[in-house]
Image (cartoon, rainbow, N blue to C red):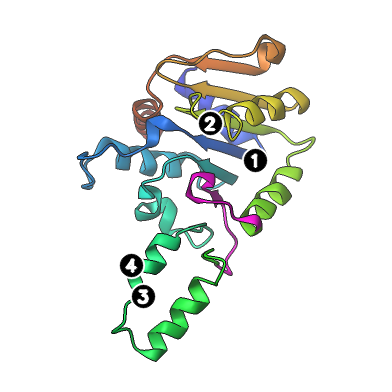
Amino acid sequence: MERDGLRQRLESCDQVLIGLGEEWKLEEGSRKDKDSVLLQAYRGLYELIREKDYFIVTMAEDELIYETVLGSDTELVIPCEAQQAEQISCPSTDEKTMALIDKLFPPENVRRDTRRQRILAPCAGENTEQQNRYMDWFKRTLGKAVVILELGVGFSAPGIIRFPFEKAAFFNQKAYMLRVNGTLPQIAEELGGRAEGIAKNSVEWIVENSRLIEQK
């Protein structure tokens, strides 16, 4: 897909559903500084969708997304991080801090947030509240012009993003699905002309296209 085609689809759609897969995981020992390609990709993704009604489902367990502009958005959430609660809580923690921890990390080990939330990370653990929020958002896509961006999603857990996104594209005749994957870009025949597969690394592809659109 050329940059103009991507821009036109994003401009004309009502909602954007995004799935981030294995290509978006920060590999051990990889750079996390501001010039890393992955951080550039998160910034580029935000620039592409910032004015749209979007929802992100991510399989990246490193939680790097929450250190980016996407994570600083007031409408985002960290869904399940019991490990962080354990790191924060220690014997020397004062009573006031403990009360705050209890509020942020309830007994069921689910971090809650009262803001509207646009990210779901199933890999971090089950979060019924966030799952419900995602489903409520997803129901609003029915009959709407939706761009489905599946980025770097393989078959490590196809039942979370890959298969449900294909199903969403199949049943919503106004949806258009774009699958970008360096090794698995194949599109189901049933989607006909309402889907496209691009055989490129999705992180690099987002960086490239966000820059080109900015220059346009």
Q: What residue is disc 1 on?
A: 15
Spatial CA span between label 4 and label 2:
28 Å
Residue at image position (70%, 43%) is: 138
Q: What residue is disc 2 on?
A: 157
Residue at image position (57%, 28%) is: 158
Q: Does the magenta stretch include residue 70?
A: no
Residue at image position (32%, 84%) is: 93
Give whichever of 72, 89 is nearer the camera: 89
Cβ atoms under marks 3 and 4 closer than 8 Å: yes
**Vertically, is 192 above or below 101?**
above
**Vertically, is 53 above or below 156?**
below
Most distant residue in the bottom direction: 95
Q: How crowded is mark 2: few (under 14 residues within 10 Å), some or many (20 or more)?
A: some
Number of dots carrying numbers: 4
| Picture quadrant of residue 176 | top right
Q: What residue is disc 4 on?
A: 87
Spatial CA span between label 3 and label 2:
32 Å
Q: Which dot marks residue 89?
A: 3
Residue 158 visible to an observer of this rendering: yes
| Picture quadrant of residue 165 | top right
Front label number (2 vs 1): 2
Q: Start and end of the magenta stretch?
A: 113-128
Reading the chain from its start, which is encountered first: label 4 or label 1? Answer: 1
The amino acid sitting under disc 4 is Gln
Give whichever of 90, 117 is nearer the camera: 90
Reading the chain from its start, which is encountered first: label 3 or label 2? Answer: 3
The amino acid sitting under disc 1 is Gln
Residue 173 visible to an observer of this rendering: no
